[in-house]
Image (spheres, rainbow, N blue to C red):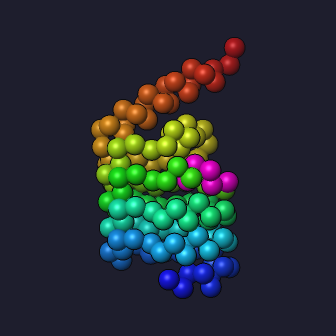
Amino acid sequence: ESFGRLTSLETLVLSFNQLTKLPETIGCLTSLKYLQLFQNQLTKLPESIELLISLEKLDLGDNELTSVPDSIAEMPCLVSLWVQHNKLTSLPDPILKWKYPKLYLVGNTKKLYEMYRKVRKNTRKKFKPP
C-alpha cells in the first residue's frame, strides 16, 4: 500500500508473486513506464490503473483476468499490452482497434479471438484508402 511514495519509479516487476489484487495506490506511480505483473493470480485491476499516464508496457500475462478496464485504451503512452493466458472473453473495442501498439492475446477464450477478428476486419474496411 506504500506505492504512493514511489512517484519517480519507472519500472516495477511483480511477477511470480501469487498476487490476487493490486492496491488502488498503484495509480500514484505516474512516472512508471513498465509494469510487469506476469504470472500472478490477478482477477481484476484497480480503476486507478488509468492514472499511469507514462506507462508504455503493461504485462498482465498468465493471470486470472476475465476483463480489463476500458480506461487502458486511453493510456496515452501505452504501446505494448500483454494479456496472454488469462480468461478474457472480451476487450474494450478501442483496444481491439489499435493500429500501432503490440497486443498479445494468445491463450484466452475462443470468444475473444472471434471478437478480435471481427473488429479488426470491420476496422480495415473503414480505413481502407480510396
Q: Residue at x 45, y 53 (%)?
A: 68
Residue 86 position by quadrant: bottom left
Q: Magenta segment, which residues?
A: 72-76
- Residue at (37%, 40%) from the top-left corner? 112
Where is residue 21 drawn, in percent x and y?
39, 71
Magenta span: predominant SS is: helix
Residue in the image at 57% along x and 20% along y:
125
Q: Quadrant of residue 33?
A: bottom right
Where 47 falls versus 29 (above or below)?
above
Count of residue discs: 0
Q: Nearer the viewer, residue 102 or 24?
A: 24
Q: Answer above or below: position of 17 versus 37.
A: below
Asked whether 82 falls inside the magenta stretch, the response is no
> Which sits in the foreground, 105 or 89?
89
Tell me where residue 41 appears, x and y as whole percent: 32, 67
* Residue 96 rendering spot, x and y as whole percentages: 50, 39
On the question of residue 8 being in view, the answer is: yes
| Image coords of residue 89 (percent x, y) | 34, 44
Instruction: Please identify the quadrant where the C terminus is shown.
Output: top right
Residue sticking out furthest to the top: 130
